[in-house]
């Protein structure tokens, strides 16, 4: 039986923030962040529970919401200071209210993949076939990117709209010939010999990227808290490298859900790269040099414009604040 792996999905921002009952608005010394259940957000809990934020005067409040529309609605209303999410996901909401990415968390490095039958050896062999993917989510964004690299487009496939968990379940049951999903579904399918992973995100480094994005008024009014957040994350990533077993146990307890078991957390962590300062500077950039994420933002604008039939033109400087990347 598959564990619920709700991660990054997309609905309308029309979800009513007033009904969410989440933490509070902006106040000095406090930041509140919404997120889904995902291994890449583990360092937030690690830094919190090791006291890395507290020692700098920051109280970080973390709230799990399994729909992007929910935490983005709460953020838009000021009930949350910000969110942890993929850059392509939040880009779609940027025209509606002001927020910016201030910290890089992770990128998917094997955690996402395309499941196919053993006889399939290329994406082109899927032309005209049914593929399960969660429309409007990072999975569709990534699939579109993969197809474009192979001279294909979404219309070459028969898309079946399913969550990543349902997609994996349908694939294993033999109801769908291909599915876009993530761990642990990829490993489970491979281990049981029920198919194979045609391609995974190790082949697309830096495309599926998670960041912390804070509301613009929070960044303006609480710069010291933002600085404490970023510095605490750097310390947590370093601790993870030096004490992985202890780190994953702490992360598992904090993140919970399907990652509540430290073994599951450690296994899931193999499919991501946690970002330290040097990696963050390369990705997000500095006040004097634009980062590699500029290319991802351009890709997200192009992809969502094509997929959703409306123009997205969010600029790098509208979506990223580099002032906190370097301590």
Image: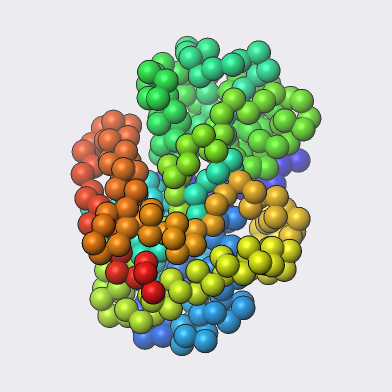
Q: Quadrant of residue 24?
A: bottom left
Pick the front one: 125 or 311: 125
Q: Position of residue 172 (x, y in %)?
A: 70, 27
Q: Please indicate, yes or no, whether residue 89 appears anywhere in the rendered image.
A: yes
Quadrant into which the N terminus falls: top right
Q: Position of residue 253 (x, y in %)?
A: 69, 67
Q: Is residue 67 visible?
A: no
Q: Please name the residue shown 61% across and 77% down the image.
A: 49
Q: Position of residue 138 (x, y in %)?
A: 45, 41
| Left or right: 83, with 177 as reference point | left
Q: Residue at x 49, y 58 (%)?
A: 275
- Left of 247 or right of it: where is 8? left
Task: Judge whether 185 appears above or below 238 on screen.
Answer: above
Image location (x, y in percent) of residue 316:
25, 52
Does residue 4 sit above or below 195 in this rendering?
Answer: below
Q: Nearer the viewer, residue 303 or 177?
A: 303
Tell me the residue at 43%/71% (across/down): 230
Query: What is the number of callouts on the image?
Result: 0
User: At x 62% / y 69%, what residue is drawn?
Assistant: 239
What kind of colouring is applied to the model shown?
A: rainbow
Question: Where 123 sits versus 204, above or below?
Answer: above
Which picture quadrant has residue 327? bottom left
Above/below status of 180 relative to 233: above
Question: Is 312 situated left or right of 198 in this image?
Answer: left
- Residue sticking out furthest to the right: 192
């Amino acid at each position: 039986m598959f564990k619920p792996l709700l991660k990054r999905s997309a609905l309308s921002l029309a979800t009513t923030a007033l009904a969410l009952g989440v933490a509070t608005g902006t106040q000095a010394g406090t930041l509140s962040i919404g997120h889904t259940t995902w291994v890449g957000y583990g360092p937030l809990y690690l830094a919190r529970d090791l006291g890395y934020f507290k020692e700098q005067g920051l109280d970080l409040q973390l709230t799990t919401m399994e729909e992007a529309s929910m935490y983005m609605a709460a953020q838009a209303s000021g009930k949350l200071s910000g969110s942890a999410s993929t850059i392509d996901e939040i880009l779609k909401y940027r025209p509606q209210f002001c927020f910016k990415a201030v910290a890089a968390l992770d990128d998917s490095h094997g955690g996402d993949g395309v499941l196919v039958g053993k006889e399939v050896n290329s994406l082109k062999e899927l032309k005209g076939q049914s593929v399960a993917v969660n429309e409007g989510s990072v999975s569709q964004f990534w699939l579109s990117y993969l197809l474009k690299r192979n001279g294909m487009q979404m219309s070459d496939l028969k898309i079946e709209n399913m969550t990543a968990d349902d997609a994996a379940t349908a694939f294993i049951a033999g109801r769908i010939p291909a599915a876009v999903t993530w761990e642990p579904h990829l490993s489970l399918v491979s281990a049981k010999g029920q198919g194979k992973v045609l391609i995974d995100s190790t082949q697309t480094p830096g495309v599926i990227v998670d960041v912390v994005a804070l509301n613009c008024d929070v960044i303006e009014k609480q710069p010291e808290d933002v600085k404490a957040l970023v510095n605490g994350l750097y310390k947590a990533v370093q601790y993870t490298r030096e004490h992985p077993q202890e780190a994953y146990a702490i992360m598992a307890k904090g993140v919970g859900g399907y990652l509540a078991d430290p073994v599951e957390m450690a296994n899931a962590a193999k499919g991501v790269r946690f970002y330290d300062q040097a990696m963050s500077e390369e990705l997000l950039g500095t006040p004097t040099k634009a980062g590699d994420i500029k290319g991802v933002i351009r890709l997200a604008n192009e992809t969502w414009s094509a997929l959703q039939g409306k123009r997205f033109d969010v600029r790098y400087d509208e979506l990223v604040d580099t002032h906190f990347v370097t301590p």
